[in-house]
Image (cartoon, coloured by chain):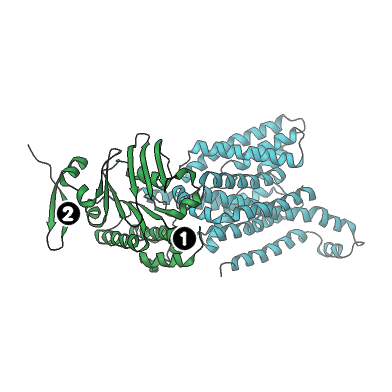
Chain colours: A cyan, B green
Amino acid sequence: MPYRPAVFTLILLALALLAGLLLDAPFGHALSGLLDQTHDPLARQLLLELRLPRVLSAASSGALLACAGAAIQFQFRNALAEPGLIGVSGGAALAAALALEAGFTGGMVVMTAFAGGVSALWLTWRLAGPHSPASQLILAGVAINALTGSLLTLLIATLPDGSLRTVTFWLMGSFASVDWRQATLLLLALPPIWALLWRRWRYLNLLQLGDAATFHAGYPLVRERRVVVALAALAASLVVANCGMIGFVGLMAPHLARLLIGADARRVMLLSPLLGALLAVVADTVSRLAIAPSELPVGVITSLAGAPFFLWLLRRALSGASHAHD
Amino acid sequence: MLTIEHAWLDTRLQDICLELHPGEVLVLIGPNGAGKSSLLSLLSGLLSPDRGRSMLNGKPLHQLSAARLARHRAVLEQRMIAAPEFTGSEVIAMGSYGHGQADATATAVALTGVGELLGRHLGTLSGGEAQRVLLARALAQLLGSTEDERYLLLDEPTAALDIGTADGLMAQVGRIAREHRIGVLAVVHDINLALRHANRVALLDRGRLVACGPTAEVMQVQRLETVYGVRLAELIHDEQDLRAFIPLPPQEN
């Protein structure tokens, strides 16, 4: 019954989407607003123009981040990796902010973010060294994140209309201001990225036996690595360019998937995006309701849940490494 | 035929010529750092020689795609990163990714006797058990291939095994080579395993091929003493028609 957790997650995701859509809205008004166009146009507008793109963006962003996180974890054989921790998101955020400042819009912002994300990942990877232990890649990521974070803050601080609010948006993420155009972009980008990564499950599995084993089993290493890293960086950059940096979803979702259905990439790459979507929608709803009528940045919620999770993984990885040296 | 012609690889290998034929067991021996694993990587196509050529039936390996190579040869790597979270059956199934033939996987499981390890995670297996699972994966890759010529390259397959298991594994590899006409190249440290199970032996020393030929011809006491830098005694068991070498303590002058 390997697909039972996927069905279960889908049901939960549907419920979370409904809750995200309707909770806190004056319930009866919102529902009847959907059904009856003439009744309370304000509630209807709230639902269709704000809430719906918002929850759909949250779901597709969570799924994209989980795709990126799972792919990066398989590719680097590193259980601690995720786009936010190894510099991809930081590089993408800095580049996206620069692009917006330069007057770019839409697809150009995403492409610039993508370039920034890939560059930051490359830098992290070079800093850590290609065959470094898991913790070293994370250390290099810390350095790159510190650099991109401070450059981003510096950039915004020097802008005439720069505010702390903008900095918070980039560093902690938010789905509050996404519009239908952005939601559509994220929704349309998800299926091809997900499918292209999922169909590489054989390569991703073999990689866990080592680079040489993967080549010997018939998979061209350099080409496949480029494709996987590019797709993961694109997924993360899409989210960052539209919704800012949302940490730890890409870390948690693949690990939860592994706990539920084992290590096989064929299943992990299928389930992780569903779990990522669920996590992001729940986090977004909590961030919206926790201190209503004000809102928390969604990254606050994902980090509150994700950071302890990361510490637990780190502890496990470090104790594993010390056993290996015994 | 898998061949290496006058191959050089930076400082690791110098002017190596070697052939591997279907159905034979060629054992590669030599001291630590002699270049055995590098030579295996040349034969597998993972590395290309700086000078000289490595070829499959006259075609340079670097001109063949990774997928095409995988239909002709499988490799048991020396320092395979064991994926502790994967089960035995998941790892062995990785051998059939290229062809999708489940019966090849089943045959590989039967030949290596790993049936009882299928449900267990790799991280919970002993070194020897994990080695057999990984060997089954490599075999599954070859047995599902429809190519006539297939080669199995084993880098220290017996490193983690006790003497009984090591001997059993090499005997099994020999049977597989004969019955399935698979050419086997095995890098082995134990010269007595080479003596017992090789059809031919290649002796490597500091990047050079010192000797290559039928086992009895290559494995002479004096030659081995020179290459390994130890004194050896040769024991002969007449009834079983067996030979073995044991190292002697250095002579005191």
Q: Quadrant of the C terminus of chain B?
A: top left
Q: Are marks 2 and 1 in contact (CB under 8 Å)?
A: no
Residue B142: horizontal and vertical position, in percent?
43, 58
Residue under label 2: B244
Neighbours of disc 2 within 10 Å: few (<14), some (14-19), many (20+): some
Residue A46: horizontal and vertical position, in percent?
83, 55
Q: Amino acid at mark 1?
A: Thr
| Chain of residue at mark 1 | B
Q: Identify the residue at the far left of this view.
A: B253
Q: Amino acid at mark 2?
A: Ala
Residue under label 1: B146
Residue A41: horizontal and vertical position, in percent?
90, 57
Secondary structure, mark 1, is loop
| Chain of residue at mark 2 | B
At horizontal 23% and vertical 57% (from top left) the residue drawn is B196
**Is residue A216 something one can see in this rendering?**
yes
At horizontal 26% and vertical 49% (from top left) the residue drawn is B201
Rounded to the nearest angstrom, the CA distance separating label 2 from label 1 is 39 Å
Q: Nearer the viewer, mark 2 or mark 1?
A: 1
Quarter of the image where one finds residue B203: top left
Q: Are marks 2 and 1 on the same chain?
A: yes
Residue A126: horizontal and vertical position, in percent?
51, 36
Residue B68, compared with residue A150, is above or below; it is below
Is residue A118 found left or right of A17 in the rendered image? left
Is residue B189 found left or right of A16 in the rendered image? left
